[in-house]
Amino acid sequence: MVSVCTPAPEESLDGYLRRLAEAEFWPDVSDFLTAVGVRYGRRLVEEATQAEEQLGLTAGTLARISPSFAASDPCRNWRFERHHSAPVCPECVATGAPHHQSWRHAFVTCCIEHELRLVDQCPMCQGTFLPGRGGYDSCHCGCPLDRLERTKADGAEIAISALIAGKMHPSRSCLAPALAFRTPSDIGEFIYFLASGGVESITDKQGKTPLPRTLWETRSFLKDASQLLCDWPAAFHEEVTRRLRDGGDRASSAPAQLGRWYQRLMSFNNDAYADFRQALAEVVGREFDGAYVGGVQIDPHARDWISAAEAARSLKVRAERLVDAVAQGQVPGRQDTSGFGHRHTMLHKSTVEEIRENRGRFAGKSEVRDILGISRKQYDLFAEAGGLAGCIPDAVPPLVDGAHDLVALRGFVRGIAQQAVEASATVAFSDLNLRFTTDRAGLIQVFKGIAEGRLHAVAGGTSERLADFRFVRAEIDAVLEEVRRGPGLTVQQVAQMTGWKEQCIAAWCQQGLLNHQCFEHAGRVGRLIQSADLAVFQSKFVPVASIARQIETSPRALISKLQAAGIATVGAFKEGTAWRGHLVPLSAVAQMLVANAESRNA
């Protein structure tokens, strides 16, 4: 029996909350979460620590079972988390087993243990089961989930579901050998690539094919991928052959003929995908007769060699530069001499194509500025902040004319877009310059925060130019303010936190009762109060106004009573004709209590 307070090892966050609600006698998890001030969804995952406190759970309970952006467990990858349905296994629910995390993955369609298809539609209300709504073993309409129809899953469904869940099952024997016994962490991305490879978007952009929302959509979406994975290797060979033939005869390389599909396949470099690269090589070696076969392993001597002059013309570089690169061992090639020392330099076509690819991949500062849409000064400040460090490798391939890796650069920009949030007040990256703020050090810290992902872009943009990205204004202002004055609280911030008047706080600082530091701002002197200093002040003094509000009397009447008891206030200052800022020393109150106790005992 699984403890209610402890999630099962493979239990989903949604299932655990349903089980927790049932233990608290709530028929619907949505009502249970609302009662404690928690709402299921992204915010719950982001603020798991706060939710644990509200639910009375041990620290880390929810964090351990929550999906995340970079999860090592494919089943807990936030990108493939089901947000529009919450399917269940009728047999698991009937036996009281926890809801499995694998059910939350967008590509899992069956229960591996019982070999049954998952169900996500209520037979009573005809609605879709939704995450964060309904009970552990019932729909939100009250229909018991253990009465759902039980349908046997086919072998391909079980194989793919077991692969994603990392579970061993005989059905996995139909997969490529490297996937039959292991599950790489990016298997969801790989299956998405196979499934969306045949879906052409209007804008021809990668990653735009939407994920399926329901089980019915999932089975339809995975139809082609299931065949490529489970009819191994025949279906995959047919797919590569078809793509080579559809690519036309004009392309001089296999990568060009296969197009973006080849690039995406080769980007999966885990050893678990070695069988797919090998299968690709077998088909390319059999079907393709061009000059360059790409990154697949095919006997290089089966290809033609060309002269350095011809290679230089195709690459648009000087022939002498290419000859010197071969002579120095920077580029593989053949060199022979004849006659009176005449040197013949030959290069393999695959080498030439690799150089061409590298020259297209690397670029100089000017091209990078054009791609990002930023000015020369912005580029210099962004580079100084370390924003382009990941795009400039320590060593670049030979015969390239720039140091910036455009693949890494575009990946860096995509990474910023993927972490976008919702916000109303924003600032465009193109406006982040020394006209926006004259604080050069602060601007560099803003760029550094953007590069490190601490400052977030705003969701909704479609541009790939960094200049067109908009960022949260409040986060940028916070960085600039911290650089200007350092960490700590201003008088205004302390006033907002405590309810004290700003002029009172400033007076206590001037009198030395509240420790602080001064800083210049807009030609005036500001005060900065550390949290530790504020805590020390509150341990020594209590404002008379605060006590008066609590006992429902006036500060003046309270001061009179304190004086009658022999307690003198401190910190007061004159404002106009009135005295404000009276503080009660806690030590004086303690002394009075001790004296009263001693007099009673005497």
Image: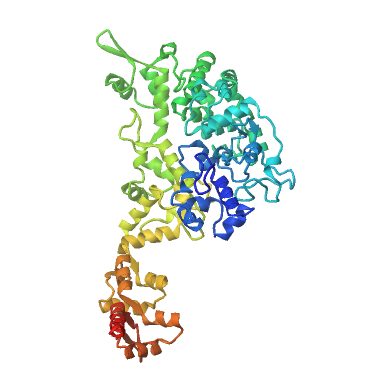
Give coordinates of residue 371: x percent, y percent. 44, 43
Left or right relative to 53: residue 26: right
Task: Please provide percent x and percent y for residue 232.
Answer: 57, 20
**Compared with residue 241, is residue 424 higher up or lower down, i.e. above or below?**
below
Q: Is residue 407 left or right of residue 146?
A: left
> Is residue 524 visible to the viewer in this orientation of the structure?
no
Q: Quadrant of residue 175?
A: top right
Residue 415 visible in the shown view: yes
At a point 37% along the width and 77% down the height, the residue shown is: 502
Say which quadrant the C terminus sits in.
bottom left
Residue visible at 42% across and 19% down in the picture: 350
Quadrant occupied by the N terminus: top right
Seen from the viewer's position, the closer of residues 316 and 447 is 447
Left or right placement of residue 435 versus residue 42 in this view: left
In the rendered image, the residue lying farthest to the front is 602
Instruction: Identify the residue shown where x is 51% and y is 40%.
Output: 76
Q: Would you say 254 lies left or right of 597 here?
A: right
Q: Is residue 62 above or below residue 217?
A: below
Q: Judge by depth and name the residue closer to the eye, 465 or 574.
A: 574
Q: Name the residue: 43% across, 36% down.
A: 407
Residue placed most toward the observer, 442 or 103:
103
The image position of residue 521, as x and y in percent, is 32, 69
Number of on-image labels: 0
Q: Quadrant of residue 518?
A: bottom left
Instruction: Provide residue 372's location: percent of width, then percent of height.
Output: 43, 45
